[in-house]
Image (cartoon, grey):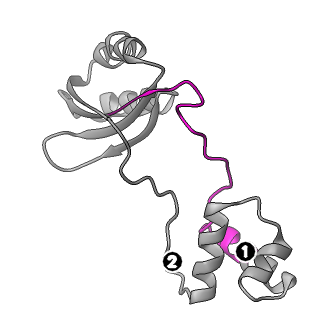
Amino acid sequence: MTIQFDDRDRKILESLQRDSRISNADLAEKVDMSASALWRRVRTFEDQGLIARYGAVLDPEVAGLSFQAIVHVQLTRHDSEKLDEFVQAIQSRKEVLECFATTGQADYHMRVICTDLKAYNDFLENFLFRMAAVESAQTNVILRAIKKEAAIIP
């Protein structure tokens, strides 16, 4: 289902993504709506599944997680049982922030975060490389973030 957005909707969604703790009254004033009309619109976005959840964005450095990498994973086996095992195992690991099945040379691309290089090496040796479906993994260490934008503006 595709939702049609107007400029006010975009402003609501952008504001909520930047600060989900903004009060209903403050957001209503910001987008020039009554508080009750705004509440109904936000509720519609939630009911339609557009707003999937609310949360806090943490600073990895402050949290003691200074190592980040993009990991390109190539699988040896593509049978459904091994794929299911791989997916379930990846979903259970706190180090894996995101994982995407992709086209191209690698089968999966993951964004991994750890305390340091030693912890990442442990993740590789004691988890990823022990999975029967994993043939290889190429690591691209993230040196610095150029753009980190969490907001999606329709």
Above or below, 98 relative to 36: above
SS under mark 2: loop
Residue type beneath disc 2? Met
Residue lying at 71% horizontally and 84% vertically, measured from the top left: 31
Seen in the image, is 64 located left or right of residue 31?
left
SS assignment for the magenta stretch, majority = loop
Q: Which residues are magenta?
A: 42-69
Q: Magenta stretch: residue 23 in it? A: no
Q: Residues within 10 Å of mark 2 (few under 14, many from 20)?
A: few
Residue named by callout 2: 1
Q: Magenta stretch: residue 62 in it? A: yes
Residue lying at 35% horizontally and 50% vertically, measured from the top left: 146
Residue 140: x %, y % from top left:
25, 33
Residue 16: x %, y % from top left:
67, 66
Marker disc for residue 42: 1
Q: Quick one: label 1 or label 2, which is nearer the N terminus?
A: 2
Q: Who is closer to the viewer here, 118 or 54?
A: 118
